[in-house]
Amino acid sequence: MLTPAARAGRPRPSDLHAVSPPPFAAYLLSELNRLASMRGWPAWQRDRMLWTVGRLAAVHAGGELIKASTVGTVGSAGGHVMAFLAELGLLDDDRPDV
């Protein structure tokens, strides 16, 4: 059980939703929402891609390309996410030629 002092240093779950994403993540997520709306993606597809793109944006700074090999390890929407990143010019396709 946590002491009140230990709990005081931790954010409450309701506070976590108030935190703004970093600019790069905000950009990626807004572009993804825009494309999903324009193209009429089903909600499940948009949500799955938002989850994957959010995880990638959390570990990449703006202005750096995201490797295709990294995208493939994050989630099941990898192919769609790679196409999305390529459309934005943010994909480093480091997959080997077959």
Image (cartoon, rainbow, N blue to C red):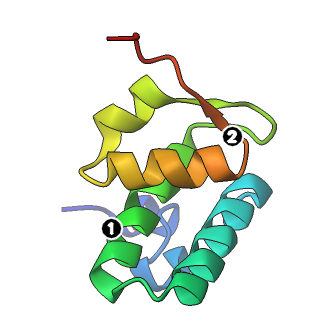
Residue at position x 74%, y 64% from top? 27
User: Mark 2 belongs to which amino acid?
Assistant: Leu
Mark sitting on residue 48: 1
Residue at the left extreme, as displayed: 1
Residue at the front extreme, as displayed: 98
Please report contact status of discs 1 and 2: CB closer than 8 Å, yes or no.
no
For marks 1 and 2 on the same chain, the one whose residue lies earlier in the sequence: 1
Left or right: 91 as drawn, with respect to 6? right
Residue at position x 65%, y 81% from top? 34
Q: Nearer the viewer, residue 33 or 22?
A: 33
> Badge 1: few (under 14), some or many (20 or more) residues near its Cα, within 10 Å?
some
Mark sitting on residue 90: 2
Left or right: 78 as drawn, with respect to 22? left
Q: CA distance from mark 1 to mark 2?
A: 19 Å
Left or right: 22 as drawn, with respect to 48? right
> Badge 2: few (under 14), some or many (20 or more) residues near its Cα, within 10 Å?
some
Measured as percent of width and height from the top left, residue 92 is found at 61, 26
Q: Secondary structure at mark 2?
A: loop
Residue at position x 62%, y 44% from top? 86
Q: Secondary structure at mark 1?
A: helix
> If the image is split into quadrants, where does the C terminus sit?
top left
The answer to which image quadrant residue 31 occupies is bottom right
User: Mark 1 belongs to which amino acid?
Assistant: Arg
Residue at position x 51%, y 17% from top? 94
> If the image is split into quadrants, where does the N terminus sit?
bottom left
Measured as percent of width and height from the top left, residue 19 is found at 64, 73
